[in-house]
Image (cartoon, rainbow, N blue to C red):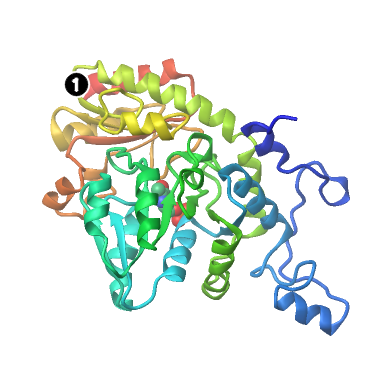
Amino acid sequence: MREPGFNTKAIHGRGGPEAEGAVSTPIFETTTFHYDTVEAGAALGLDRGEGYFYTRWGNPTTAALEERVALLEGGEMAIATGSGMGAISTVILGSLKTGDHLVAPRASYQAAHELFAQILPRYGIASTLLDTVVTEAYEAALRPETRVVYIESPNNPLLDVTDIAAVARLARAHGALSVADNTFASPYNQNPLLLGVDLVVHSATKYLGGHADVTAGLIVGSRNRVLALRPTFRIHGPVLDPFAAWLVLRGLKTLGLRMERQNANALALARALAAHPKVERVHYPGLPEHPGHRIAHRQMRGFGGMISIEVRGGLAAGARVVEALRTAVMAVSLGSVETLVTHPASTTSVTIPAADRARAGIREGLIRISVGIEEVEDLIDDFTQALEAA
Ligand SMILES: *Cc1c(COP(=O)(O)O)cnc(C)c1O
């Protein structure tokens, strides 16, 4: 029999019945689990017994989500966390110690950037933050004490693309752990573990959940690498609630359908916006003129649902366009069924000095679009009327 496809895996996992023959995974909303003997309890606490012990250790609903995402990412094991940052901080703090060094893009997710730039130095851990994500920049930043090489591709705000296989090879040759944030692509479009990366992290708040109604994260990798992070996870405690795990599991069943539509909508909208006279530039890895297009074509199955555009007229024009949109919703976050837009220079990055904003690629007229699953004609109409109004 052939290897099941993405949607079959997303819906059925590895197969087999749920508890009591349920078709939908039951929600085990319980913090603790009964054991029959003190020996059995001791074994469970040490991870040696069959069954569950305490929800911070593990929970059947959460375990079903972990198994499903591990399957979709091509990993052996996963840990579900209460947020994407719970996953990222568990991996980073669980893999580094005083004296170690990390290499990461400067333009990584804002809170991840603050972890690298502000929290790690308090523990005597140094970071080199790269202004460009070309492989040569990663190579030049490696030091003898580099222990983690961090990738986010495509990333904010210009959808820069990293050659994941090349950077993973560099890290491995150097004896460093490679970690990729696969939130923007989702496992439907890209599997960094299959490109040689050691660990994948996700904000499941975005595409995996897919409906802007649950905050969650995941860490995925080989059994040994994931087990190595368990003590940090259990001690720091960014646990995912079983009901939230169930919401992500429900979202996962339609991830393939949503991503297929979001890939197509984003490409069509990117093309339409590129042809609009009020749009100076469109950043989308699916357009041949995007600097990362060739690499994206090689390592991704689809180019994703995230687009950035630069409108003519700077800060004021950017703000006017996002305020004039009627269908697209002005809100942070991404990866949901509805189209979401942000104008970083006037909102999420307003506290960053203009020079630093420019260095990070956040130009005054830059608008970030998380393309939803609406009819693309409606989205093109909406952006067209907003650009005319601005
Ligand atoms: C949102 C996001 C995160 C953080 O996830 P939370 O669930 O908000 O903690 C990390 N990385 C990327 C790329 C994100 O978009």
Residue at point 52%, 40% (across, down): 187
User: Where in the figure is residue 289, as x and y percent of width and height?
Assistant: 25, 24
In which quarter of the view is residue 54 placed? bottom right
Label 1 within 8 A of ligand 1 by Cβ: no
Is 160 located above or below residue 136 in the figure?
A: above
Q: Amino acid at mark 1?
A: Lys
Residue 194 image position (x, y, % from top left): 51, 43
Badge 1 local density, few (<14 within 10 Å), some, or many (20+)? some
Query: In the displayed structure, does residue 324 sit left or right of residue 305?
Result: left
Q: Position of 108 compared to 229: left or right?
A: left
Q: Nearer the viewer, residue 362 or 176?
A: 176
For the point 59% across and 66% down, which residue is it?
A: 227
**In the figure, 390 relative to 366: above or below?**
above
Of residues 2 and 385, the one nearer the viewer is: 2
- In what element is the residue under mark 1? loop
> Can residue 100 be spotted in the picture?
yes
Residue 332 visible to the viewer: no
Look at the image and tell me in which quarter the C terminus lies.
top left
- Residue 242 in which image quadrant: bottom right
* Quadrant that contains the N terminus: top right
Compared to residue 246, the image places residue 340 above or below, namely: above
Residue 368 point in image, percent of width and height: 31, 36
Q: Which residue is mark 1?
A: 278
Q: Where does the image place residue 296, in percent across and percent down from the top left?
A: 37, 33
Residue that extends furthest to the front in the rendered view of this protein: 173
Which residue is painted at 62% across and 33% down in the image?
6
Residue that sits furthest to the left in the current view: 355
Judge whether 224 appears above or below 188 on screen. below
**For residue 213, side relative to residue 366 (left or right):** right
Q: For residue 291, which quarter of the picture?
A: top left
Disc count in the image?
A: 1
